[in-house]
Amino acid sequence: MSLSGDRIRELRIQHDMTLDDVARYLGINRQAVYKYEQGIVTNIPLDKIEKMADLFGTTPDYIAGWSDEEKPLYSPILETMSNQARIISGGVDRMPPEKRDQALKILQAAFVEYSDFFKEENK
């Protein structure tokens, strides 16, 4: 694996996302994300690196392996969440753990699916 591939995989797992979740957000197929993670594709387009940085709340240079500092940032995607989504999120935090995990996966899938909509809505 490559350094950038390792980082993409680690960030994806850290954010409890599937290959499909990341692929859907990037507008590519899951095989492409898999190839990025495995180091099969090493010349990842810059626009995809930038979108992954937004998705994972880090910097493009960390994902690309140009910097060792993850520099956690407030994700622009999360920044676009509406007040209703924040209220829902707070309710999820109070759920029993087995229900919380299921609810978070559903909300995360919906957010990834409609992330472009949220960006447009908040312009």
Image: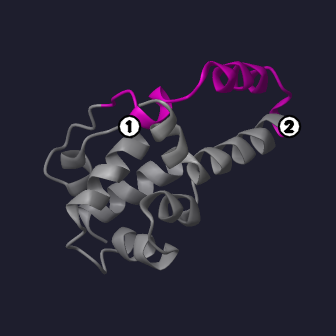
> Which residue is farthest left?
66
Q: Where residue 50 appears, x then y in whole percent?
A: 27, 51
120 vs 50, left or right, is right
Quadrant containing the C terminus is top left
In the rendered structure, are the residues bearing label 2 and label 1 in contact, judged by CB atoms less than 8 Å apart? no
In the rendered image, the vertical position of residue 31 relative to residue 110, given as above or below: below
Residue 111's image quarter?
Answer: top right
Kind of residue at disc 1: Gly
Around disc 2, counting alpha carbons within 10 Å, would you say few (fewer than 14), some (14 to 19), or many (20 or more)? Answer: few
Magenta span contains residue 74: yes
Q: Residue at x 49, y 30 (%)?
A: 80
Quadrant containing the N terminus is bottom left
Q: Where residue 83 appears, x then y in whole percent?
A: 62, 18
Residue that numbered label 2 is attached to: 99
Kind of residue at disc 2: Lys
Residue that numbered label 1 is attached to: 57
Q: Residue at x 54, y 44 (%)?
A: 117
Q: Which residues are magenta?
A: 72-98
Viewer-proximal residue among 85 and 44: 85
Q: Secondary structure at mark 2?
A: helix
Magenta span contains residue 68: no
Q: Where residue 78 appears, x then y in whole percent?
A: 49, 32
